Image (tube, rainbow, N blue to C red):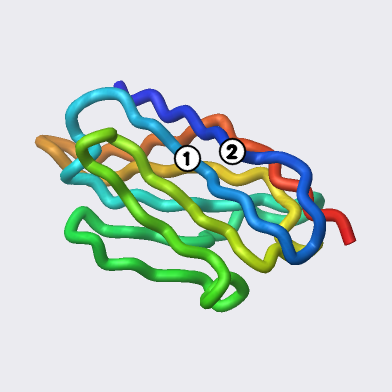
Amino acid sequence: QVQLVESGGGLVQAGGSLRLSCVASGTIFSISAVGWYRQGPGKERESVANITSRGNTKYSDSVKGRFTISRDNAKNTVYLQMNSLKPEDTAAYYCNVRGSYFRPYDYWGQGTQVTVSS
């Protein structure tokens, strides 16, 4: 079982920045794909950014050029640097770790709230 703990959320004005962190327990982090997802009020959960075990990244069109995902395998941590924040970025942000090691796995954190005021 992998535990994921997100931090770094908060209230920020439009145009500001935040950095989210997600620390994973266990030993599978370095071989896993990791992602950030978000769910805004009245909306479905959507993918924001993903990074593979090899460091390849992918972003949603809505955050491309503003957000950067990175990982530190030595610290079992994934980061999401969020710049030029907009009110529409307001959401609960969730960390996800997935992969396969003898069997598939898919773990979620409990989320951290990001609120962007206009």
Task: Characterize the local packing of mark 1: few (<14), some (14-19) or many (20 or more) Cα atoms within 10 angstroms.
Answer: many
Residue 105, located in which quarter of the rendered image?
Answer: top left
Q: Residue at x 18, y 59 (%)?
A: 54
The answer to which of 45 and 113 lies nearer the viewer is 113
Q: How far separated are the C-alphas under marks 2 and 1?
A: 6 Å
The answer to which of 47 and 72 lies nearer the viewer is 72
Percent x, y for residue 107? Answer: 39, 35
Give the residue number, with chain letter if any, for mark 2: 8
For the C terminus, the image quarter is bottom right
Q: Residue at x 62, y 50 (%)?
A: 18
Q: Residue at x 53, y 75 (%)?
A: 64
- Horizontal side of residue 22 vs 110, given as left or right: left
Give the residue number, with chain letter if any, for mark 1: 21
| Chain-order first, disc 2 or disc 1 | 2
Percent x, y for residue 110? Answer: 56, 30
The answer to which of 98 and 22 lies nearer the viewer is 22
For the N terminus, the image quarter is top left
Q: Is residue 117 above or below residue 99?
A: below
